[in-house]
Amino acid sequence: MRRRNRFSIEPKYILIFFVVLCSILLVASFKYKEKFSPFRAVVGDIITPMQKGINSVGAFFTIKTDIFTSKQELMKQNKELQSQLDNISYENRILQQEKYELSELRKLYELDEKYASYPKVAARVIDKDPGNWFNVFKIDKGSDDGLEVDMNVLAGDGSGGGLVGIITEVGHNWARVRAIVDDNSNVGAMILKTNENCIVNGNLKLEDEGLLEFSDLEKSDSKVATGNEVVTSYLSDKYHEGILIGYIKEVKTDSTYSTRYGYITPAVNFDQIETVLVITELKEELNPKPVD
């Protein structure tokens, strides 16, 4: 049994039909305006809300498009500003670092001028023992730079700086320093104003107070006062004479009333040491013993 072909019209004929119909309606509407007025009113009532809706939708998408474009532009500007800010921050860090390094170099220069009679070499701290104080630390210069055990180490500070400690171990490109605040340190010292001798002892228990202690200051009629300078003594067998250790903080008398002891504010800030000067001559070289 044969199937019947379905009825179909080609799209082009439908298009032609509606074009012709629209043309006829257009001509008729101009020719018979009065008769078509009710029809136009009805069509207007139907079309106008549709046009408003279409306009509203169009306005909505226009606003959204403008917002999206503005957002994209703002994101681009923000990215450019962030890049500029990053560059400024980096340059600021470099300037701060250079300023700090310049300050450290100025301190070393002032310290070098203060002890101009001693030959010296500058070094950086590269490692330290645990703890807040730099009681034992390592520097980046060694035997290749002429450093030896028992050479004196200095550091600058806001008050001019002074004695840090002494070298205890040397490698070809490094050296270990024991600071005068270490428990194992004892320095022959002298009160500069009264020429009285004493011993400056390291004591890590005084770390939180930032102080050194001294002992064996003989009882005498002279008055050692707060603020008096304490320097290395000529009696010391390893430390060069006259290097600033610190300033008298407090003086006490022992239970036997025979000697005095007390506390010293160091000339160096042992909480933070980054650069040092090493005196490259031993004391025994500057003061050779007579040959028998």
Image (spheres, rainbow, N blue to C red):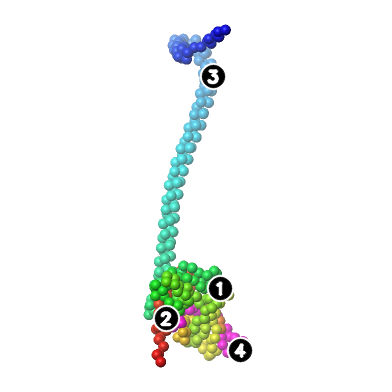
Please state the extent of the stretch shown in magenta in the rendering: 238-260
Name the amino acid, label 4: Thr
Residue 150 point in image, percent of width and height:
45, 79
Q: Please, what is the three-letter code of the amino acid marked with disc 1?
A: Glu
Three-letter code, disc 2: Leu
Q: Nearer the viewer, mark 3 or mark 2?
A: 2
Q: Are marks 3 and 1 in contact (CB under 8 Å)?
A: no
* Mark closer to the chain start, 3 or 4: 3
- Is residue 247 part of the magenta span, yes or no? yes
Measured in 3D between alpha carbons, the distance from the residue under mark 3 to the one under mark 2, in whole angstroms, is 109 Å
Q: Which mark is residue 282?
A: 2
Snapshot quadrant of residue 156 = bottom left
Position of the N terminus, as image quadrant, is top right
Dot 2, crowdedness within 10 Å: few (<14), some or many (≥20)? some
Residue at mark 3 to residue at mark 4: CA–CA distance: 118 Å
Task: Please tell me which residue is depicted at 47% across the width and 86% down the height of the picture.
Answer: 235
Q: Nearer the viewer, residue 70 or 266?
A: 266
Q: Which residue is mark 4?
A: 256
Mark 4 burial class by Cα count in 10 Å: few <14, some 14-19, many 20+:
few
- Residue sitting at 46 percent across and 40 percent down? 72
Marks 2 and 4, how far apart in space? 38 Å
Q: Position of residue 163 (x, y in %)?
A: 46, 77
Give the x, y percent position of residue 131. 55, 69
Nearer the N terminus, badge 3 or badge 2? 3
Measured Cα–Cα span from mark 4 to mark 1:
28 Å
Q: Earlier in the sequence, mark 2 or mark 1?
A: 1
Q: Which residue is mark 3?
A: 46
Task: State the residue in front, 49 or 230.
Answer: 230
Q: Which residue is mark 1?
A: 207
